[in-house]
Amino acid sequence: MPGETCMIFVDDSNVWIEAQKFAASGNSHMPKLQDSDRDPRLRIDIGRLVERLRGNRTQGPSFLYGSRPPPNDSVWKAFEKNKFETNIYDRAFGGKEKEVDNSMSVDMAAKATELRIEAEFMAKHFGDPKATEKRNKTTFVVITGDRDMMPAVKRVLEFKIRVELWGWKSGISQAYLDLAAFNSLLSVHLLDSIFKDICFTAYRSTRKIKSVVGGKTMVLRDVDESREEAICDRLLQTGQLFWKTRWDGEADLCIEFPKVDQIETLILRARQLLPDVTILSWPEYRAPFFNKDPTDDVKTANMYELLGPDFVAVDEHDNAKMEERLQNLTLKNTTENASDSVRGNASGNTNSDGAGYNSGNASANAGGNINSGNDTGDDSDGGGWTTVVNNIDTEKRHRRVVNQRQDCPYGLRCKKQDDCGYRHTPQERQLFQQNPNRNLGMRNTQMCRWASNCFRGRDCLFAHTEAEARCLDCKQTGHFKGDAAKCLLQT
């Protein structure tokens, strides 16, 4: 229909969260992530999204609804660049969204009401059908799947305005599909079908400071920047979440797998996927920079022994003497351990838990021969490098940052005091430090016996005037507990 117009309403959180879940779930475009149910690398091309939603129609007033802090500051700017009015709201103390759905519902109902009233007024008083034609040629394009938007959608349909509902299959309510089956003005479309056109994967790490965790990183040598995307697309076959980092001026590409404990298996898999690329573990890559073999770290870790009575200090800078000293210590310890094991078995000595001194390292038979026992060392990683795991929970860190920007609802009555993760005023923090074992929830509930002559001033926990008094019953200021008349007036 020529001259059609569309108004677009976007629930930002619904779009991003469900898109990341769809990307991680495995589909015809990319394999399933084995270590995460959401893919934080997913990005949406806002320009292409708006273009697909608009089609051949004219874009009318369009609105975006989201919460602070945003997933990415550039998101708001991208929507504004595409003629959107952004409506951003603060989250609640627990990080939950507030006002977003209600604001979107109110705006949809308001715009629909404007179109209906204009059409009825112009037709009734002036006999002008243009306003009615304008309403008939307007479509509300709504991106959501949340059932909370159902009342607003129904109200728009009651005004004989068409609605296109877009959402991800995993997050769209069945109620919309049921309604569309009985109302021809409502059509439901899946964003899954245009995923390839509007989404892409941003592999590059967004850290402000370029760094990697060595035990979770592999290094691809001499990789041209033009090949980065193709290489990362191949590494998607590992099914693991990863980020890429390249230092300025460096030809080597670092690939970090933040949720992997043992990188060695992935290195072998990556070498199969990229046979024409030299791939090294982080210790192998860094060793030449320090002019040493990677196993030097292992030698250093094992060189510290208990000092015996025959210990002789050696020059730590004399490599020959140090190597000889290590060999002598190793030979001595091996001999002593074997001798102790033989004596333990021969005499039948046991330790406090009833087991013999020899715990499998060596045993003596009747002929006095020493046989090697089972190796009790942990070799579960196949001889790979020991990984130091970085146990940083990004979701907890995000919640902590959000809480630090919000005022504590309990104020001085906060039981956690200095351990509270929410924001407190400097005066509150000072009182917490001065009264670590006092219940500040009782502050100003009794009159200070020194009144105006109190030397503690604001640091005093008692009230000095009636205006400072606080009632424990009604929680109001201006009177103390037991003043029934004023309590009734306050309530």
Image: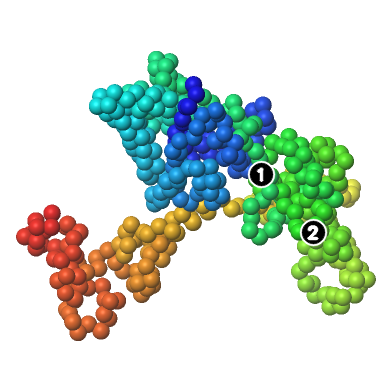
Q: Which residue is drawn at 64% across and 55% down?
A: 207
> In the displayed structure, does residue 11 sit left or right of residue 27?
left
Foreground pick, 439 / 367: 439
Residue drawn at (62%, 36%), measured in percent from left and top? 199
Residue pointed to by mark 1 = 202
Q: Which of 222 and 454 is in front in this view?
A: 222
In the depicted structure, whether residue 354 falls above or below residue 28? below
Identify the element where label 1 is drawn.
loop
The answer to whether residue 342 is visible is no
- Name above or below for residue 422 compared with residue 308: above
Residue 160 horizontal/vertical position (percent): 35, 22
Query: Residue drawn 34% across and 31% down?
Result: 115
Amino acid identity at mark 2: Gly
Instruction: Tell which residue pokes out farthest to the right in this image.
Output: 320
Q: Position of residue 393 (x, y in %)?
A: 56, 50
| Mark 1–mark 2 distance (CA, rounded to whole Å) | 21 Å
Taking depth in this image into account, of 157 and 397 the one nearest to the observer is 157
The quadrant of the rendering that contains the C terminus is bottom left
Residue at (9% x, 56% y) in the render: 488
Q: Which mark is residue 249?
A: 2
